[in-house]
Amino acid sequence: MEFPQQQKPAADGKIIYPLGVKEITDKISNDEVVKRLKLVVKTYMDMDQDSEEEKQQYLALALHLASEFFLRNPNKDVRLLVACCLADIFRIYAPEAPYTSHDKLKEIFLFITRQLKGLEDTKSPQFNRYFYLLENLAWVKSYNICFELEDCNEIFIQLFKTLFSVINNSHNQKVQMHMLDLMSSIIIEGDGVTQELLDTILINLIPAHKNLNKQAYDLAKTLLKRTVQTIETCIASFFNQVLVMGKSSVSDLSEHVFDLIQELFAIDPLLLVSVMPQLEFKLKSNDGEERLAVVKLLAKLFGAKDSELATQNRPLWQCFLGRFNDIHVPVRLECVKFASHCLMNHPDLAKDLTEYLKVRSHDPEEAIRHDVIVTIINAGKKDLNLVNDQLLGFVRERMLDKRWRVRKEAMMGLAQLYKKYCLHHEAGKESAQKISWIKDKLLHIYYQNSIDDKLLVEKIFAQFMVPHSLETEEKMKCLYYLYACLDTNAVKALNEMWKCQNMLRGLVRELLDLHKQPTSEANTTAMFGKLMTIAKNLPDPGKAQDFMKKFNQVLGEDEKLRLQLDQLISPTCSCKQAEQCVREITRKLTYPKQPTNPFLEMVKFLLERIAPVHIDSEAISALVKLLNKSVEGTADDEDEGVTPDAAIRAGLELLKVLSFTHPTAFHSAETYESLLQCLKMEDDKVAEAAIQIFRNTGQKIESELPQIRSTLIPILHQKAKRGTPHQAKQAVNCIHAIFHNKEVQLAQIFEVQAIKLLVRWLLGMKNNQSKSANSTLRLLSAMLVSEGDLTEQKKICKSDMSRLRLAAGSAILKLAQEPCYHDIITPEQFQLCGLVINDECYQVRQIFAQKLHVALVKLLLPLEYMAVFALCAKDPVKERRAHARQCLLKNISVRREYIKQNPMAHEKLLSLLPEYVVPYMIHLLAHDPDFTKPQDFEQLRDIKECLWFMLEVLMTKNENNSHSFLRKMVENIKQTKDAQAPDDPKANEKLYVVCDVALFVITNKSTSCHLDSPKDPVLPTKFFTPPDKDFNNDKDYLSSEARNVLLTGKIQPKQTGVLGAVNKPLTVTTVRRPYTKTAVSDTGSNASTNSQPISPATTKNRYSSEASEAGARENEENPQIVKAEGGKKVRKLTCDNARKLGINLH
């Protein structure tokens, strides 16, 4: 608008003052000036816009008040009164101000703005005048006059800065309202907001300023909300220049753009309508740090509690999700951290996040995998419904992560969820059911090899699954129903945990016993061995060894410490006593105090493992009471999610396991009375478990509890005579364990068990002077050949025959563990024993393999028996083959570890080194009854499978050039003859064929086998003749076609009808060919020297399908007969097969 011409004062130019006001000049004092100005202020306050006469009258005074004398007056009160007058003048003369000079107007408004600083002190006597000034300016919108000034922006900036600086918490609502009216009118009615003016508003949103003056922040926040329609375009322009065009110089706030966006979004998302697409552009920046900054910002925007940005701006949300796969690690890490807030504040977005978190849970960066777990667990702890099954599945997977930190976080996180929702039931049964799998999966980790994993599982069990801090009754109820709900593998893991803890207690007890003995070199050596074994059961065994040596030294010097430790591991130690002992021991070891004490931490690990924090006499009593309630039907079984029968069975199994580890805790009449009730129950498993508990814990029943004894004996007799086979066995064992007159008791129950009696008798004699072992071995061999029916009258049921075969095979294994009997076991009998692992009955194969494994892993059986596992390649059941492979791995590992730890073992490498099993395996396979035609491709393929079953495990690593050692060993065998039949060309041919197949496998699977062998292998003379210098066997026994079959595994079908019928299974009418009895030529041997292999028509398959089915029909109870699968063949030993082994039975 055009400014009007200067209004003319009175004609004579004289300044007219209000009535009673004398002239105001620089000649009078400040006090007098103030006095006169107050009257002038009152006059102007009373005037309104309609007072034309007065307006004209006081025009000269209005112009005079804008003179330099007043505007630059040093007196504060004078300036305030003048400012109030000027504000009223603008009100009275509006819309045309009496001042026409642009410079004068600018000077006046800057002067008024400076006076507004007086608003800061609300306690000032003049505050009301300052408030009046503000109110007047806001009401009249006086500053709008400045829009016509070229440099009006300077005035507005100064005004805004002044108002933001003076606002404080002592101002009332009216002050803030007038400030907002004044500033908002400038923004809304102006042509636009300059960047400088926008900065004066936005600077109050920056965190540093926000924290300094909260009222200024609130004022800016309210101002922006009020002017959102006008100021949004200015804000968009600012961010466009900084974010898109990169012009950081446009504002001093450029470096705070992300903070500003966050604050503006929180104030009103409409302020950023045009800015959000710019952020999508920045998310795709090539600069990783820039992407990181944008991701951090958007994480706050998307994750804010009431934010609807993700639904309102789907393109930006999808673009943001893409950053979960960013190449820059910090960006991915920030995205994962954001997910936690997002899951908690926006459950509806969980579906979008799940797939991205799945990928990140497999991120190569450990920190990211760790934070994925933290994200999911934190959300789950807030509300289990926030995390779906997939997300929890990611955490479950990470329990097997290669990094300990990640595994630990996953396990601890799931343990916390289990305690919160399953133990405390904070979210009801439905939530508890949702994560009921956690308990099983946590215990499964106990199967891992890492001692850290095992220790963490023990800690989780003691703190989260069955908290040791609970009262005994509550604690045992928790354990009772937990055990009933665990799956089979978890139960085994828990049992193993207690077993390991008990074993460690035993080691510590043995160590303390050594301390009680006089000092000697042998004593010191024994102590060192115990300490090394204990250290293996603690974290970081290397450091643990040093700490255990130090702990042992402290034990030797401190008798009180030994007494405390002795009490801790005592069978009679209660849980409360254990806690007290642990506190006392740690207190003694705490001095001198250190910030970190790794020695003390290691000792704490040991104490935590050996302290009985769950089980004592009181706990067993509580468990038995729970069992009684289940039996009586008064327990809360259904409420806990288990049936009464399941609770009873699981409770007894639990007590059975604890009877092994804590037998002393069971010794009370009350406990045994309850167990007697269980013995009378119809459930076979329950009764069997109760018998085992008596066997394990009842050593003092006969002497201390006669009433229990008199009730127990008749029940045991009844179970031994009429119970199931397992019950009978357990009843006999129970009588043997707890009664002194066991012979009398046993005589009443059963006749002599021939096989076990004979074997135990022989093992007790430990010599063969009477040649009894020879005849016993022949009897056992006859038992195997006759399939368990020595009379061959077919009056024995299939299941009993299976048990007899198993007993015979197991008996040979037992005898072979004694050196004096091992030496007289012939190769033929060894082969016959080995063939039990291919028995037609699944349970026979299973139990025999387990017995074989246990004896081998304890180094009780000679190395040659490990070759028997090669025959497992023919087992039709996949699980049995897998189990056999695991047995091999374990046995080989044990033997190699033994050799490393025992320097003297190097002198016995022939009986310890796993590679020396190969000659025995080759000899065993060469005498396989199924191997009848050395050039038959299918038989060769079977031989190759058996060889590779063993060689694959042996050749996993090429330690000490072992591959060339294996090759050299097989080549050496080809230069010998079969000691079992040295003059039999066919037997030797089969041996050499197997050697060639073995060489074929070794050379095809190893590139380093052709190197020179580090040492010359030694061959067992029992199976191979010494090499003949005149004999050089360089013949290749495998045709090119045979090699191709071995390489590809494919056999070209032949058209010949005769050969095509070879592999057909025998029908039911095919009967075992009875063997011909001949006189024994040498009574001093357990095998006939005249026995020669004969070649009648024999069975190719070790089972015929029909025979298997017929056996299954007869087999009404275990063991079960498993039908051959997948082309695999299982073995039925016949007399013909025995003859092939060169065995004549008399």
Image (cartoon, grey):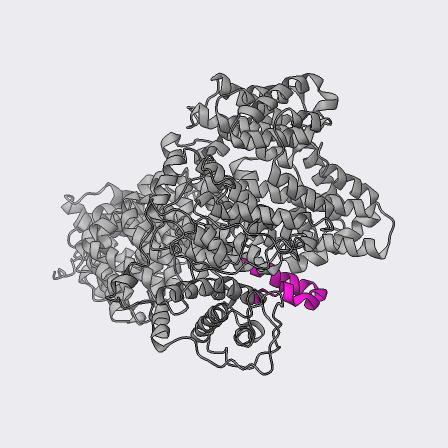
| Residue 595 appears in the rendering | no
Q: Is residue 1088 left or right of residue 1008?
A: right
Name the foreground residue: 47 vs 1040: 1040
Residue drawn where x is 36% and y is 44% of the image: 1107
Q: Quadrant of residue 620?
A: top right
Image quarter where the N terminus lies is: bottom left
| Residue 514 appears in the rendering | yes
**Coordinates of residue 194 in the picture (x, y in percent):** 24, 63
Name the foreground residue: 449 vs 763: 763
**Coordinates of residue 491 in the picture (x, y in percent):** 50, 39
**Coordinates of residue 119 in the picture (x, y in percent):** 38, 48
Name the foreground residue: 368 vs 553: 553
Name the foreground residue: 1133 vs 525: 1133
Specify whether residue 815 is painted magenta.
Answer: no
Q: Is residue 167 above or below residue 427?
A: below
Q: Is residue 562 above or below residue 61?
A: above
Specify whether residue 903 is painted magenta.
Answer: yes
Residue that extends furthest to the front in the rendered view of this protein? 1079
Q: Is residue 986 left or right of residue 322?
A: right
Question: In the rendered picture of this protein, how many numbered marks are placed on residues?
Answer: 0
Magenta-drawn stretch, dominant element (helix, strand or loop): helix
Specify start and end residues of the magenta stretch as a single range: 890-915
Residue drawn where x is 67% and y is 27% of the image: 698
**Coordinates of residue 937 in the picture (x, y in percent):** 35, 67
